Image (tube, rainbow, N blue to C red):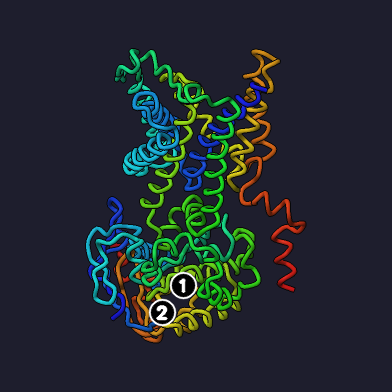
Amino acid sequence: MMLKLEGMSKHFGGVKAVDDVSLTMNEGEIFGLIGPNGSGKSTTINLITGLYAPTSGTVSLEGRDLTALAQHERTALGVARTFQNIRLFGNLSVAENLWVAQNGHKQRRQHFISRWFKAGGLQDTNIDELLRFSRLHSKKDSLASALSFGEMRRLEMARALASNPKVLLLDEPAAGASIEDGQLLGERIRAVRDRGVSILLIEHMMELVMGITDRMAVLNFGRKIAEGTPSDIQSNPDVRAAYLGTKNKNKEPADA
Amino acid sequence: MEFYLGLLQILGVHTLLGLSAYVVLLTGQVSMAQAGFYAVGAYVAAMCTAMFGIHILPAVIIASVSTGILAMIVGFPALRVRGLMLVVATLAFGEMVRMFFFNFRWQIERDGKLIGPNGAEGFRAIRFFPENGWETGDVALFIWCIVVIVLGLLWWVDNTRAGAVLRAVGHDEVAAQSVGLNLTTIKVAAMALGGAIAGIGGGLYAHTVTHIEHGVFGILLATFAIAYPILGGLGSVFGTLLAVIFIQGFLVEGLRFIGDWRSLLFGALILLVMNLRPTGLLGERMSPLKTLFSRKSPVVTNAKETQ
């Protein structure tokens, strides 16, 4: 398996943002993570990347325990992410955004001088290829803050790919996009998977999640309430209850 | 003439002070410790030449290395805090350094005279330049050679991946961490580089004035250090250079004729500049060379490519 979470919990004071969640992602899989607002999806990503330290539980990548590692060490091992609210380096050019993100395993093994101070490092073939893949090549010298919303989303995903990750964590990549954009995004995510990257997708746009994920899990109030293929999930009564609510079966009789 | 050459010396050492703050500021850290590193550099270099008869060049290098190491040691704990807390922590360090030299006495006999730091009285007779027959012009030239080397080096670093990484950390630490940058290493490296540059500036400063004392390395100097890159803009090293010329050359020296009103006008002019150019005199990310030598702005060039 690729990525494995075991008994992961994160409590903020009395709030159990993530509560005893276990997940297993296989290699080459597009794995969906859905749930109502505040159900702990983003917190789960933050636990996987190491932005938060878990209250309990472990996370491992290809059998290697990541729990005690710092964020930059996890990136080197192959974890990359995007943010729900796009976080680009707006003061750098498009190409430079990819340049500074070259912190993967192979890139780290380069000689100190060539990694940090090499002349013409910006003309790297890896950067060039990613720019073309993301259809941003014509914009490579403009400031990231000058891009359109869609271009920013594409750049953020390209930046995450610049470290040659094994797992890419996408936090609501379709937020703010139209249905048509969502379909294009689905193709892009598949294309990324075809590059050999496993994907964990958090998303509210159900057409997208149901359409492209191989398997998915549902969180509610920090707990995992279901896991399975998209069709399993669609017919799962607990999931329907979480999203749509339930008839209160224990309603007290009016005149008891 | 002598006056202008003297002014040139002041501009040189202050440019180094400003550049030391510039490097740290690129990573988004406001450090008020630069005057402290400048002070340490001044005392170390002065002790090397005046007490032990070392040549100025190795003395300045020794000063630079020792302040660089000091900055690294200070950087590790200090950079665990951010924003205002970092300002307070670095300010406290600066005052610590000042109070250290207020109490620091270490004098040795040389040519029948006691020489060395003498507490509150300061460190007198740092006379390497006059003893070796350097004229004011020679000193100014020497200082500016070093300034040009440091400026060139920083300009080059700015255009490598290391420079982009410093700016990335300064823009968004969470994003920088998420793409695998080690924040502690990068911030401490910037701090060490800044400290080393402040050490060079301080070492040269001590020899231009021949007498240093704790009082000049106070909060005012720390404020100047951070004001230069902020006023000049973080676009490139030349912003800091321009701001030093503007503040020291124009506001401090050029307005001497209006007497006591100078301080008032000084503040007002800085306010005015910051209002008209919020990202500094040279703006945020524009190499002055590029704007000088190309007619099209980079954005326009891109629009053409897309067509």
- Whether residue B78 is visible, yes or no, is no
Residue picked out by circle 1? A161
Q: CA distance from mark 1 to mark 2?
A: 9 Å
Q: Secondary structure at mark 2?
A: loop
Q: Is B140 rendered above or below residue A246? A: above
Q: Amino acid at mark 1?
A: Leu
**Residue B15 at x, y percent in the picture:** 56, 35
* Residue B137 can be seen, yes or no: yes
Residue A22 x/y as whole percent:
26, 72
Other-residue count near label 2 (Cα within 10 Å), few / some / many at <14 / 14–19 / ≥20: many
**Residue sitting at x 46%, y 83%:** A212
Going by the numbered disc 2, the residue's amino acid type is Val
Residue B251 quadrant: top right
> Where is mark 2, residue-wise?
A197
The picture places residue A137, in percent across and down from the top left corner, at 62, 73
Q: Residue at x 63, y 41 (%)?
A: B280
Residue at 71% x, 72% y is B306
- Residue A255 image position (x, y, % from top left): 31, 62
The chain ID associated with circle 1 is: A
- Whether pointer 1 and pointer 2 mark residues with C-beta atoms closer than 8 Å, the reply is yes
Residue extending furthest toward the right: B295
Question: Compared with residue B84, is residue B122 higher up or lower down, i.e. above or below?
Answer: above
- The quarter in which the N terminus of chain A is drawn is bottom left
Left or right, residue B94 beside residue B19? left
Please tell me which residue lies in front, A197 or B287: B287
| Chain name for mark 2 | A
Looking at the picture, tell me which residue is in the foreground, A112 or A6.
Answer: A112
Quadrant of the rendered image containing residue B83: top left
- Mark on residue A182? none
